[in-house]
Amino acid sequence: MSDLSVTPVDRGRVYADTNYVVDGYAMADAETPNPTHEMAEFVVWNAVVDGPETTVLWDTGSHPDAGDGYWPAPLYNAFEHVDAADHRLADDLDAAGYALDDIDAVVMSHLHLDHAGGLSEFAGTDVPIYVHEEELKFAYYSAKTTEGSIAYLASDFDHDLNWEIVHRHRHTLFDGFELLHLPGHTPGVMGAKLDLGDETLLIAGDECYVDANWADEAPLGPGLLWSERDWFESLQTLKELERRHDAAVLYGHDLDRFETLAERLG
């Protein structure tokens, strides 16, 4: 096993209707024509992966001005990142014991606005930014046309960045750090398999927002699902890896799972 360590970095809280992340969570029917909707608390997080020679940042979080007009109002009303202004990337890295200059590479699980909001910190540098080919194409298609998804902002990623394109379904970044293509939430979501010496950690990314997506195999809500068929296939890929390696799994926005694994990994 490889000598890797993972430091989860808390980037704040988002509040949203649970129906967005669990399909059919509160459905109307004849007996309950006006079901109660539940606003839930979700975590935004990054992680620093330390290898023998390379320090990698996983995702970059939301832009600190998300709630101050940077995010379009309809999106912010649906996914309210209430403390984005208190979670600047440099500050949160510092709290975790790292500086921006310590980061040798960045892996973008995908380019949605709650993941790509700190990419501008690496503009004009030679820090490689790993992204899947399908994700970069879809992000630009979405941000630069009226098609695709509204969850991409060109101002997050349309910079002078040192893109490193991942083309295949599996890509070894370095020994013990394997990137996994997990389409479903978007065309180019990436997760990872990390060998930590005494255990294996799977990063599911937004393939699974919360435990219900994993444990109950409940799909994401339609607004967050690019392809349900691909999502299900990606889920089974992760579950097979979990069984094979007796792995721990870190989801995209599940607060309880994040806090449990952060305490264990820390």
Image (cartoon, rainbow, N blue to C red):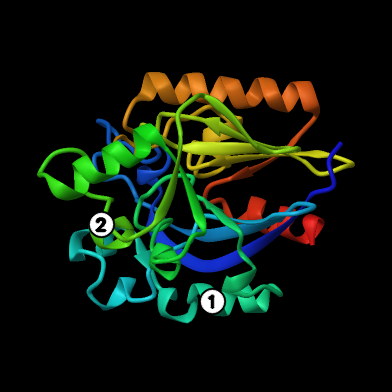
**Residue 75 x/y as whole percent:** 25, 58
Instruction: Say which residue appears at 58% left-offset and 75% top-offset.
Output: 92
- 164 lies left or right of 9: left
In this picture, residue 152 sits left or right of residue 192 = left
Is the residue under label 1 in contact with that under label 2 (CB below 8 Å)? no
Q: Quadrant of residue 33?
A: top left
Residue located at (57% from left, 59% from top):
46
Which of these two is toward me, 116 or 136? Answer: 136
Q: Amino acid at mark 2?
A: Leu
Of residues 78 and 180, which is closer to you in this image?
180
Name the image quarter holding residue 101: bottom right
- Mark 2 surroundings: few (<14), some (14-19) or many (≥20) residues within 10 A: many
Q: Residue furthest right?
A: 198
Q: Residue at horizontal 49%, vertical 25%? A: 168
Which residue position holds label 1? 90
The quadrant in which the N terminus is found is top right
Tell me, yes or no, if residue 161 can be seen here: yes
Q: Find residue 153 and name its label.
A: 2
Residue 57 location (% of width, % of height): 59, 57
- The amino acid type, in three-letter code, at marker 1 is Ala
Decide if residue 193 is on the left or right side of residue 1.
Answer: left
> Is residue 32 shown to the viewer in this render?
no
